[in-house]
Amino acid sequence: MEIQGHEAAYKTLSYMSSSNIKKMVVIGPESTGKSSLCAALSEYYGTIWCPEYAREYLLKNGRDYKQEDLLSIAKGQIRLEEEHAKKMTAVASSKYLFIDTDMYVMKVWSEFVFGQCHKFILDQIVIGKYDAYLLCKPDIPWVQDELREYPDETTRIRLYHYYKDLMIHQSTPWVEIDGEYEERTTKAVEFVDSLRG
């Protein structure tokens, strides 16, 4: 297992300032098991996880979204993460908060669909602080649902490489997660445990 990244200094958001909470973000293209991995990890570590706000937003407002909707989704994701970070004070058995999606996902989504990204999202990438990233590889079968857009393998791989390029050029430790679902969870646990100390 290869762990990437190096030390960085970020200006942190107020709700990310608690040093006893370790924020682990799961990212990657659609249908790569991000939510399943977050759920499995939260169960393993006896903690909670923050879901992807975009699903809630699109189910409520429809999938015919515009660029301004992505800004609303980004702000909603940050609010949801803040709510879950506050809940962590009641979770005594773990210091980990697993997060399905962050502003890197919003950046890739914005640029892939609309060719540009709102400054708010880019600013949040700069000031946000996380402890690790788990990048899910599109090597498991596509599962269709009412919101997913890109089932073809070429597009999935192309999007994956966008995410991997972002990981390579940022400074937080990260790992590639691949294999079947149980294997993915095992690799993720090994990675999280390796960061202790």
Image (spheres, rainbow, N blue to C red):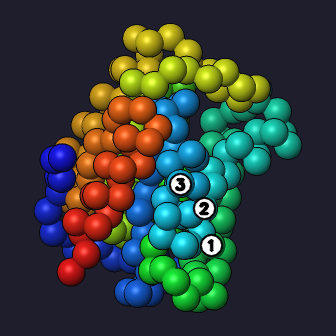
Q: Position of residue 71 (x, y in %)?
A: 62, 49
Q: Amino acid at mark 1?
A: His
Occupied quadrant, residue 189 = bottom left
Element carrying mark 3? helix
Q: Residues within 10 Å of mark 2 (few under 14, many from 20)?
A: many
Figure quadrant of the C terminus: bottom left
In three-dimensional space, the C-alpha distance between marks 2 and 3, rounded to whole angstroms, equals 13 Å
Answer above or below: position of 52 versus 48. above
Which residue is farthest right? 60
Instruction: Return the disc, 3 or 1, that comes first in the chain's sequence.
Output: 3
Per the image, the residue denoted by label 3 is 40
On residue 191, which mark appears? none
In the rendered structure, the answer to whether residue 145 lies left or right of residue 17 reads right
Report the residue at 63% width, 43% height from top.
Answer: 70
- Residues marked 1 and 2 touching at CB (< 8 Å): yes
Per the image, the residue denoted by label 2 is 50
The reply to whether residue 166 is visible in this rendering is no
Report the residue at 66% width, 74% height from top.
Answer: 83
Answer above or below: position of 187 versus 153. below
Q: Position of residue 89 (x, y in %)?
A: 58, 88
Instruction: Return the disc, 2 or 3, that comes first in the chain's sequence.
Output: 3
Q: Amino acid at mark 3?
A: Ala
In three-dimensional space, the C-alpha distance between marks 1 and 2, rounded to whole angstroms, equals 6 Å
Report the residue at 62% width, 72% height from top.
Answer: 84
Per the image, the residue denoted by label 1 is 84
Report the residue at 58% width, 55% height from top.
Answer: 39
Element carrying mark 2? strand
Instruction: Return the disc, 1 or 2, that comes first in the chain's sequence.
Output: 2
Between 84 and 107, the one lying in front of the other is: 84
Q: Residues within 10 Å of mark 3 (few under 14, many from 20)?
A: many
In three-dimensional space, the C-alpha distance between marks 3 and 1, rounded to whole angstroms, equals 17 Å
Q: Amino acid at mark 2?
A: Cys
